[in-house]
Image (cartoon, rainbow, N blue to C red):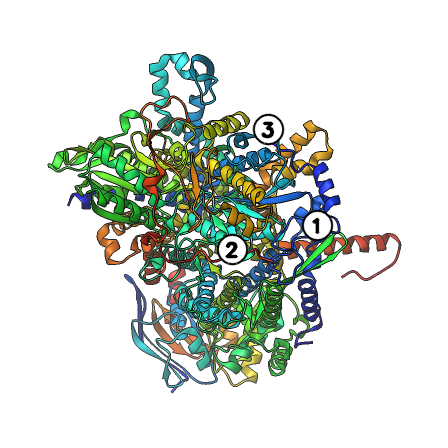
Amino acid sequence: MGILEVKDVSKRFGGLKALTDVNLSVAENTVHAIIGPNGAGKSTLLNCFVGKLIPDTGSVMFDGESVLGRAPYEINQMGISRVFQTPEIFGDLTVLENMMIPCFAKRDGSFELNALPNMMGQKDIVERAEEVLEDMNMADKRHDHSASMSRGDKRRLEIGMCLSQEPRLLLLDEPTAGMARADTNNTIDLLKEIRDRRNITIAIIEHDMHVVFSLAERITVLAQGTPLVEDTPDNIKGHPKVREAYLGESA
Amino acid sequence: MSKTDVTRRGVIKTGAVAGAGLAVPTIFTASSAAAYTNEPTGGEVTLGFNVPQTGPYADEENDELLAQQLAVEHLNGEGDGGCLNTFTSKALKGNGILGKKVTFVTGDTQTKSDAARASAKSMIEKDGAVMINGGSSSGVAIAVQGLCQDAGVIFMAGLTHSNDTTGKDKKANGFRHFFNAYMSAAALAPILEKELGADRRAYHLTADYTWGWSQQESIAAATEAMGWETVNNVLTPLASTDFSSYIAPVLNSGADVLILNHYGGNMVNSLTNAIQFGMMEKVVNNKDFKIVVPLYSELMAAGAGENIKGVFGSMNYNWQLDNEGSKQFVKSFGEKYGKPPSNSAQTCYAQTLLYADACERAGTFNPCGVAEALEGFEFDGLGNGKTLYRADDHQCFKDVLVVKGADNPTNAYDTLEIVEVTPVEQVTYAPDHPMFAGGALGTCNPGA
Amino acid sequence: MFGLDKKDTTLLLVVAALTMLAPFLLNPFPTESGMAQFNAGYPDLMQKFVIFGIFAIGFNILFGLTGYLSFGHAAFLGVGSYAAVWIFKLFTYNVFPAILLSVIVAALFSLLIGFVSLRRSGIYFSILTLAFPQMSFALAYSVLSNPKFNLTNGETGLQVYADDPQRFHREGLPDLPHLFGLSMRSTHTMEIGAWSFDFNVGYYLCAIVMLVTFYLSVRIFRSPFGMMLRAVKSNQQRMNYTGLNTRPYTLAAFVISGMYAGLAGGLLAAMDPLAGAERMQWTASGEVVLMTILGGAGTLIGPILGAGFIKYFENIFSKINDNVLHQWFSFMPDGIEDFMVFIVHPFVGKGWHLTLGILFMLVVIFLPGGLVDGGQRIGRWLRSRGQKEDKTTGTTEPAE
Amino acid sequence: MDSFLLQILNGLDKGSAYALIALGLTLIFGTLGVVNFAHGALFMIGAFCAVTLQRILSLSYTVEDPTQKDFLGNPLKVQTPYVESWFGPNVGGAIIDWAVPLAILLAIPVMVLLGLAMERGLIKHFYKRPHADQILVTFGLAIVLQEIIKYYFGANPIQTPAPDALSGVANLGAVIGMDLVYPIWRIVYFCFAALIIFGVFAFLQFTTFGMVVRAGMADRETVGLLGINIDRRFAIMFGVAAAVAGLAGVMYGPINPPNYHMGMDFLVLSFVVVVVGGMGSLPGAVLAGFILGILESFASTTWATTTIPGINQIIIYLVAIIVLLTRPRGLMGRKGVMED
């Protein structure tokens, strides 16, 4: 029994079948990659996990509880954090403030009218945020304006924000898309470190095979809305069906 | 560009010398040396002219302000003296009021109760005005009248036609020279009977706010009393611009008279729309279809243009009125500004003179003295003919004009012609008339 | 001090000093001088400054922090005023219960409108909030003032009549709004030489209320809640995926700012017991938007400056008529005097709207951060000039 | 039945004005992404183009006629328009009579130039600024434009009558054997509006210029990448939108005499129309304009106002609220437009 269980999920957009009978199980404390050519339905599937989309049929269970019909913030409170393709951070806020917000969400839940205490007086939150920044090697940037950072730093901050919530499942949506090589390698190193040091399950959607094979412990290949195969990276590398799905398309 | 020399720098300097070291305005104060609010202590007395400088009635303001400036000139003995020559009370000498030179300040009502009170307050609190004159809607007049009562200054109401101003909202410190909705109806009814017959079916379109209701109630009562039938009364929102959806149902209603209880822009548009729908050419119940606009003003007539031909209405004053005071006023105003005065201009002019005269006769600016001098005061020579300021409700009683859009106007100023001057007896009512009931005058408040 | 850091405490103390000394600061010119035209230190205008300051401070909590542009706040000001006048009519002229009720009523009303409007964001939210004051105004002006059920007294505005019940009104209490017997209108006038200064009870009540609300707004700005609101403005998506429900945050901000508006409405009625329907028109909402932006949205002090600026314009510039102009330019030869009057005439008196429109455009175009932004730029410019001079004299200070 | 049809006609007529203004607003919004609060002012200036032309055509020389007296007893100054003395009273009179339709010729260049000037001089600098800033600066501009007009023309409405041949009423029902009289000019206005709406749609649909603009509305970046100077085209579209609003104003004069604040009266309504139609959707704007016009007409009937007092004052806003809550993007809005 995996921490994330996807059963018979289908989703249509008008006449377009985006997902057909997807079954997937993500085991706890593994890195599970979902790969596939463009239009295979990777992002649609991910959106079904976080409450942005509701599948037409099937079920998505997280740790034995259904996530369907819940709002994104509720699903996050259940323990799923998401990293976006383009880093989504609070651009108007400083790095430290960015980091404090998930800490508040972790401590106070989805809403708390904390209108009178001074923010800097929230010692536990500040400490926690500083600690994560330290962990992310961003402590020296804590008072920077987050919108003016490099893309790699934004990504690092976003991942840090997700980790500060100590999620049980971290979803990554093409975390290195549009990044320079150096930034990509940094990010891979960061994710490896996370994988090795924490008790966390990671599900990753990725295009870049270099990233996938450096990180993943299991890989699901998705094509035309259906899982093609699921196996270890080594087995996937030489799998004929995968070659067909990728090469057949590009050829 | 007209200018009066009243407040040129030289004058201000002497005023400053005279006023230095003496008490300055203290308003709403419990412990003050002054006997009443804004007691003038220097060589000048300040009047406050509160008029809508912005908003849809801004042009009305222009005339009111010109008239008030003219009145100040005449009071200070400048110009040709205007109606000081014809006024039956001879207390005014052309040397200001009680020997003090008259100056004035202006404020913008924006035709909003709040803004009007704010500008009146600023004139009372900051500029030391002893009297507030002017305004162009009943809502504003009632709001400012209440303020002046509390503050302890005299209020002369300007253009306000609602019964409430001297009805349920009457105040001891407030006076109204303008006529009201009841008087319009009482003056119009006999003429309508004579011109249109006693067997008519009337359809009312009424502006959906206090004045509109009061106007409609008055005219419906008066016309029903002479045998007309009221087919329908439809309330139209103040903010309406296109009245087509209110006009169209009139066509099939079987009515043969349309009464537009509208004022200002509302009236201009509703009348224009009614003419568009060919109302004036219609024959219903074998009678020519007619339109009545109970309250006319020159500006509304100008705005409605050709459309007012043959449309009946009533007015407080018209420059074509043939009496000594009127002729004198038209001459003074016309020579100075190159156009005949409007009826709101005459109202504000007359009110300024009346206030000044009452101060002279009372020998004080104290509002209680002034009010006493105005109460029950009868006079002539300001343009309206013989006029009485009734003590019971501070409403003024005088002849009311019934007018009609002229068929062949020769110039921009005679688009309205006087059909009848309804004598004051016909428009007089008892102070406790049901339409004016409720509310009390209270006692005069000198402030301080 | 007061749970604020040093900078904020200084700001609070400066604002407190300014409001307490306002009667002096706003009347800098001798009463009889030609410049007295520009004096603003009379009770009514001083009261308006701080009351609209409160309104704008509250609006800023919503607009400045969350970026939600509401055109509906005039409605809350309006219901606040109506609620207060109804207390005057039915129970007592004491302003305390009146103001309390106006805040409560505004809170309920804003909860309702906020609950509906906040289901949308962006311009859709703006248009939804635009719809409510327009409906409120239309109904208050006409339908709700019909003789059978006169809730608003329409065109004239709701006011207190002699035959109203006023159940708790006793002999010896002022016949005007008062605070436990202290009349809002009593004014002490102090004369020093040619100057005269008015100290008005109502003004000081409003000023103290404003200081309290300003203090609260500083606390809110610096609180976790304030940071959440800024986060809403910055990135709602990230909020949602961080486990935070944005709607209660925005709704709370909406209701808080609605309560500020209701408080301002209640104070307006307490200073002058009349509530007009025009207070609810969308243009009245537009006015508070102008105030906030003009002063600097999202800054602490900006809205107060903006409110003062616009009210000063409305009350002082509109009173400059041709006579006053002639007086100003009377030292010039006649021809030039007339010419100057001719030039200035369209912009003052009845033309004050024109000047306001032009100034407003200039601020939005050149000072997106409002007057506060302008002040900061001048400050920076002065500092950088200072630094340049330092450099030329050879001192080596580390640049920032 | 007659009154039902009459209210439909009234609704279509009101809707024509709403639709034209909303169409222009949507053109500006869809192409430039700018929320233009000065659009009502453009409508108003259009109407004053007609007033101006009427004034120009009526320019007169003055002769003192000693046989007649003015109100002060001085000889009456008789004014004769130059056009009448040049072309004779008949032709000259006809020219003045047709001032409003002729004003279209004046309004098109004036409005296009004004629109271009606005876009190049002001709006251009606001593309990257938040919507709130755009709303505010155009609102300021609206106040300035309206105050300028007030300064020159006064606050009182000014009659701009329709030509004699087009005033009066026509019996529309004659064909179907009913009595259905309706003002000719209002029919003209409706047809005129329909013509302009079709013109704008045809222009966008069938010209290359229009196709590029439509592509740009859908995806500005891609079209920009194709090396097409989309900015200049969009600027021209601003001129077109201004002209549409202006023409709506010119022809509106005979229905209701123009005054300086008529733009503000329409502004809020037209925004409601745009939002109900769906931000950025041209057909949506037109559809919503007509629907709201008709609803407003029916809400004004005695039947409606006695059932729900005051419904005529709030119907538009009520509809807007209901539509926005049930169809978040308006009747025909696209996803992702103006949602943040």
Do tag 1 and tag 3 residues touch (Cβ < 8 Å)? no
Answer yes or no: is residue A24 visible: yes
In this view of the protein, which residue sits in the foreground, C360 or B295? Answer: B295
Marks 3 & 2, CB-CB < 8 Å contact: no
**Residue B10 vs residue B224: left or right?**
right
The amino acid type found where label 1 is placed reads Thr
- Using the image, tell me which numbered label, if any, was put on residue B444: 2
Asked whether, in this view, residue A120 is left or right of residue D131, the answer is right
Q: Residue B303 occupies which quadrant of the picture?
A: top left
Q: Where does the N terminus of chain D fall, quadrant-wise?
A: top left
SS for dot 2? loop
Label 3 sits on a secondary structure element that is loop
* Eye-nearest disc, 3 or 2: 2
Q: What residue is shown with label 1? A: C31
What label sits on residue B79 in the rendered view?
3
Q: Chain of mark 3?
A: B
- Measure the C-alpha gap from mark 1 to mark 3: 30 Å
Residue B208: percent from left, percent from top: 33, 50
Chain bearing tag 1 is: C
* Label 1 close to label 2 by CB (< 8 Å): no
Q: For mark 1, does the 10 Å Cα neighbourhood hold few (<14), some (14 to 19), or many (20 or more) residues? A: many
Q: Residue at x 30, y 52 (%)?
A: D312
Give me the C-alpha separation between circle 1 and circle 2. 29 Å
Mark 2 residue type: Cys
The location of residue D180, given as percent across then percent down, is 17, 38
Q: Is residue B90 above or below residue C43?
A: above
